[in-house]
Each structure stands twice: as C-alpha cells, then as structure tokens.
Image (spheres, helix red, strand yellow):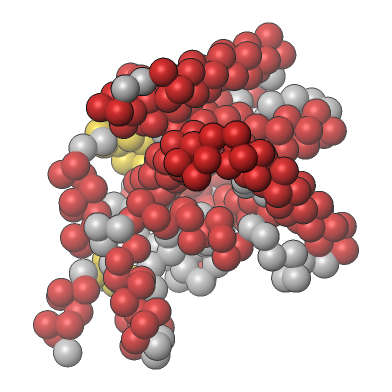
Amino acid sequence: MTASTLKPQPLKSEAIESDFRLRDIIKTLPKEVFIQNRRKAWTKVAVNVLLVGVGYWAIAISPWFLLPVAWVFAGTALTGFFVIGHDCGHRSFAHRKWVNDLVGHLTMLPLIYPFHGWRIGHNYHHKHTNKLFEDNAWEPWTTEDYDRTPSGIRWFYRRLRGRFWWIGSITHWAFLHFDWRPFTGKQREQVKFSALVVIAGAAIAFPVLIATTGIWGFVKFWLLPWLVYHFWMSTFTIVHHTATDISFAMPEEWNEAKAQLSGSVHCDYPWWVEFLCHDINVHVPHHVSTAIPSYNLRQAHRSLQENWGEYLKETRFSWSLMKEITDKCHLYDADNAYKSFREYHASK
C-alpha cells in the first residue's frame, strides 16, 4: 500500500484536538507532491517575469482610463514574484540553499521586501499557527490586551481589523522585516543583509525612476502596483487564518495537527488571480507540509479532501466574505472564536 492510498481511521472531533499528530496526516499524502521539479519551478519564474513585463508595458501605453486595469494586473503579477520567493523561503523551490536564497532575494527585491527577515518570521508562524500570543499572522488581541493598549493604537487596530484590512501587510512589512535587533547570531546577520539589499536597491532604483519619469512615474510604475500587491498580501493572509468559526488556541490547548489542518482556510479566487499567484490560496496542504512546492498544492489538496475532508475549511472569495471577517473577527473569544468590537463595547 502506498502513501497515496492510505486512509485514516474515522476520528471523533476530540481525537484531532488531543492526541492526533501532524505526521499522521502527512503520511496520507501522495509521495510525489513532495518532489521538486526543476523544469516547473524555472518555468514559473520565466512566465512570471514575462507577465510582470507585460504589466509594466500595459502601464506605459495605457490611456488614463485603463491604468487601473494595468495596475491591478501588474500588482497581481508582482504577487506571483512573492509566491516564488515564498517557495524559496521554505526551501521548496530548489534543493540548493544558495539557489533558494538568490532567487528569493531577486523576486522580492522589486517589492522592497527583505527576504530573510520575512523568511524567519514566516517559518515561526508555521510552527505556531493559530497559537495565541505566538502566531505573528493576524493574531487577534485578547480583550485584556485591548483594554490596556493606548487609545491611539486601539484606533489603528480597529482600522486594520475592519475596512482597512488591506494595509495590514504594509504595517507588517514596515515594522518587522527591517529590524534585525531582535535576532542573534547568524539570523541577525541574515536579516541585516536582506534589509540592506532592499534598502540599497530602493536607493538606486527610486531616484533613477523619478529622474527619468518624474514623481508621477514613480507613483504610476512602482507605488500603485506595489499597493495592489499589498492588497493581495493582506487579503490572502487574513483569509488564510481568519473565520468566524476558526479559533486561535491558548498555548496549553494548542494542537499542531488541528491548527495546520483545520486552522487554515482554502479559498477559491477568480482563475486569473489563482494563475498569477501560483495557487498560493490552496493553503491547507502548505500548512500540513511546507515542503510541498506551489505547483503540487492542488494535487495535495485533492488528497486532503479525500482523506480529511470533514476537517477542512473551504470558502470562496467575495466581498461578502471580507465583510463578514471585518465585521465580526476582531477580538479573541474563548467560547465563540471571535467577538466583534461592537459586541465587546456593548457588553461593558
């Protein structure tokens, strides 16, 4: 019997909450989903470079009324660059570490995104997915933390958990990935190196862009596509780990198998988003094992649907979905996953 044909025994809900292990889920996945394919990986890079080039060409030639379309296309294609760097950060792009580091830096450089600063923090997220006080991706505040936070920061937190969710990844980028002081040893040197690489890149590219195209050229060719990229980054990440029926867990109650299988969300987006972003929103298998390359995520997800379908959270992107998340998923609630700001203030 191969790994791809193994079937889990029926489980009661409390089993996956207590003693079930992540490796038991991984064993049911087909072995081929873990195999890196050099041709597929480099084809994705080549196609992505071409598509980003098409996006910038469209920006250059489009009349003013078509520029929003060009910005959305270019920014979404740039998100594909990040997804390739994402594979590199998990060492699922190539077998050689230096290749992953090189491609990761190059694909994230146009986004001014420090590779190692993001990579280390993101891998920490995978080790502590949906663990309260540890996860660094859209972790909800407790009501106690909310109450003792200065009013100005509370105001900003309410915006990020509400209709301004789409700037969430900008704050994450600005406050976390350029600061190497919390790290020690080799990690500090890596984070510092990546931060200096993108700072140097921006110090060269931005003045050249402004000198050749003016301030409007900087806004048109870099800033607005970059904001589209951050819209997708914020949206993808909040949807990946936020739902009215998915709760963060206290550290003493946290279970790795439950967190990775049932604490992350599969979301279907329009086909062109899925294509340009390399299926990053087929997200549950990626949390079951970060060793699965992006081009194998759909096959892995089909296996999870077959073997573990009752534990999966699947949805479809829509504005009503975002409205539900941003209306209700605000503060941690031990009994109901989340409590909205309105509910909390009404109860005081």
Work out whether residue 186 can be spotted: yes
Is residue 93 shown left or right of residue 259?
Answer: right
Residue, x 63% and y 14% (percent of image)? 46
- Tell me which residue sits at (30%, 28%) in the image: 64
Q: Which image quadrant: the C terminus?
A: bottom left
Tell me if I can see residue 270 in this picture.
no
Question: Residue 22: image x %, image y %?
Answer: 56, 44
- Nearest the viewer among 140 and 196 is 196
Taking 283 as reference, is 183 left or right?
right
Along the line of sight, which residue is nearer the eye, 258 or 86? 86
On the image, the x and y values in percent for residue 77 come to: 48, 26
Numbered disc total: 0
Q: Quadrant of the N terminus?
A: top right
The answer to which image quadrant residue 162 occupies is bottom left
Percent x, y of residue 4: 54, 18
- Above/below status of 107 relative to 219: above
Q: Which residue is most to the right?
A: 185
Left or right: 155 with respect to 128? left
Q: Which is nearer the eye, 128 or 213?
A: 213
Farthest-out residue, left: 346
Question: What percent of the width, then of the height, locates residue 243?
Answer: 29, 52
Work out whether 342 lies above or below 245.
below
Q: Observer-nearest residue: 319 or 305?
A: 319
Name above or below for residue 28 compared with residue 289: above
Residue 180 vs residue 228: left or right?
right
Give me the residue at 55% from left, 25% from top: 294
Q: Quadrant of residue 192?
A: bottom right
Residue drawn at the location 25% of the way across and 27% of the way down: 65
